[in-house]
Image (tube, helix red, strand yellow):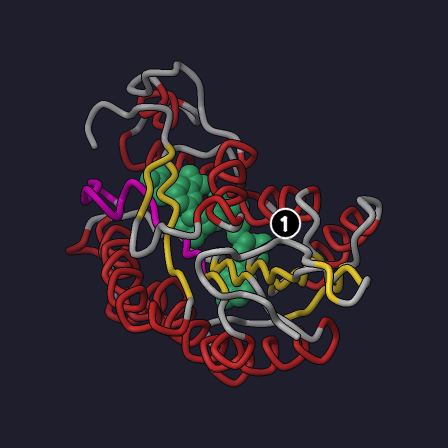
Amino acid sequence: MFLKALPGYLLNPTIGGTTMTKTAIVTGAGQGIGRGIALQLAKDGFNIVVADLNEKTAATTAAEIKNLNVDSIPVVADVSDEEAFQHLIATAKDHFETIDVLVNNAGIAQVGLIEETSKEDFEKIFRINVNSIFFGIKAVAPVMRAQGGGTIINAGSIASHKGIELLGPYSATKFAIRGLTQAAAQELAKDHITVNAYAPGIVLTPMWDLIDKRMSEIHGVPIGASRQKFIDGIALGRGEQPEDVAGLVSFLASDKAGYITGQTIIVDGGIDYV
Ligand SMILES: NC(=O)C1=CN([C@@H]2O[C@H](COP(=O)(O)OP(=O)(O)OC[C@H]3O[C@@H](n4cnc5c(N)ncnc54)[C@H](O)[C@@H]3O)[C@@H](O)[C@H]2O)C=CC1
Ligand SMILES: CC(=O)C(C)=O
């Protein structure tokens, strides 16, 4: 029933006169970049599984998507828990039959000096940002392999390419994600599964509200000043929006990106220090 075989991966193929709508799971889709990606993929014609820790925001995003002529379900899941991720994949498969795209977007940031970061916080950010992607790849690969293929897209960052002061543990997780993406792409290529990552810059979401507040406290500058300093280094002259990231993910999830794998692609408006 699943038609994917690279090349020639068709979005919504027609089989015996019936159009098959593809399905994407987006983690952390209750707000911010994940929500932006989920809405864009819905506009591209995917049914969407909206996964998030936050039940209320997941339900709101899923309801918004249902107004876009595709189907959507919210699933409450802590993706840093392997069993919860397996349950998410099983729920998506039960509901929509295929899982064509998994966007491992959920993540957290922590701001502070490496020397002042506790072992518990260091382990926590790895659990949420990295273990989740490891669990996601492990859970979805057998499903995609059995279907004949699929696409996994992970949340990197410009911090996947350059360690950023006061974002040490966060940068370490994003470098790890770049490595996992490259290795998974090599291992899964024979199964017609592509694995890539997006690497945004300074995206104006609740995550950056928190980063700015904490950095501004540490530097003793007014709220907003730390973020502005980063934005001043962007060639395109403005902070990034979730839609800017969603445009890249839309391409990576499309037939047009069928020959791209193992890449962590920067979408940052041209930041001078990367
Ligand atoms: N905002 C930015 O400037 C950038 C963000 N990124 C990455 O993009 C991704 C999304 O970032 P934002 O939208 O800005 O963050 P955000 O904090 O605004 O939203 C994150 C979403 O993930 C959910 N989430 C957090 N932990 C979860 C867990 N364990 N299980 C399930 N859901 C969970 C939250 O409930 C929230 O809805 C993250 O991986 C982040 O590291 C990368 C580069 C820049
Ligand atoms: C949050 C994040 O990834 C950056 C680079 O700001």
Q: Position of residue 11 (x, y in %)?
A: 62, 53
Task: Find the magenta span and give its range.
Answer: 152-166
Numbered marks: total: 1
Horizontal and vertical percent position of residue 198: 39, 46
At which x and y percent is residue 24? 61, 60
Task: Judge: label 1 CB < 8 Å from ligand 1.
Answer: no
Residue 111 located within the stretch drawn in magenta = no
Quarter containing the C terminus: top left
The residue nearer to you, when weighing 229 against 200, is: 200
88 sits to left or right of 216: right
Residue 185, quarter of the rendered image: bottom left
Q: Residue at x 83, y 48 (%)?
A: 69
Q: Is residue 164 magenta?
A: yes
Q: Which residue is mark 1?
A: 38
Residue at (42% x, 66% y) in the render: 193
Residue 208 visible: yes
Question: Camera-side residue: 262 or 66?
Answer: 262
Indicate the secondary structure of the residue bearing disc 1.
helix
Q: Locate residue 62: give its quadrant.
A: bottom right
Q: In the picture shown, does residue 158 fall above or below 177?
A: above
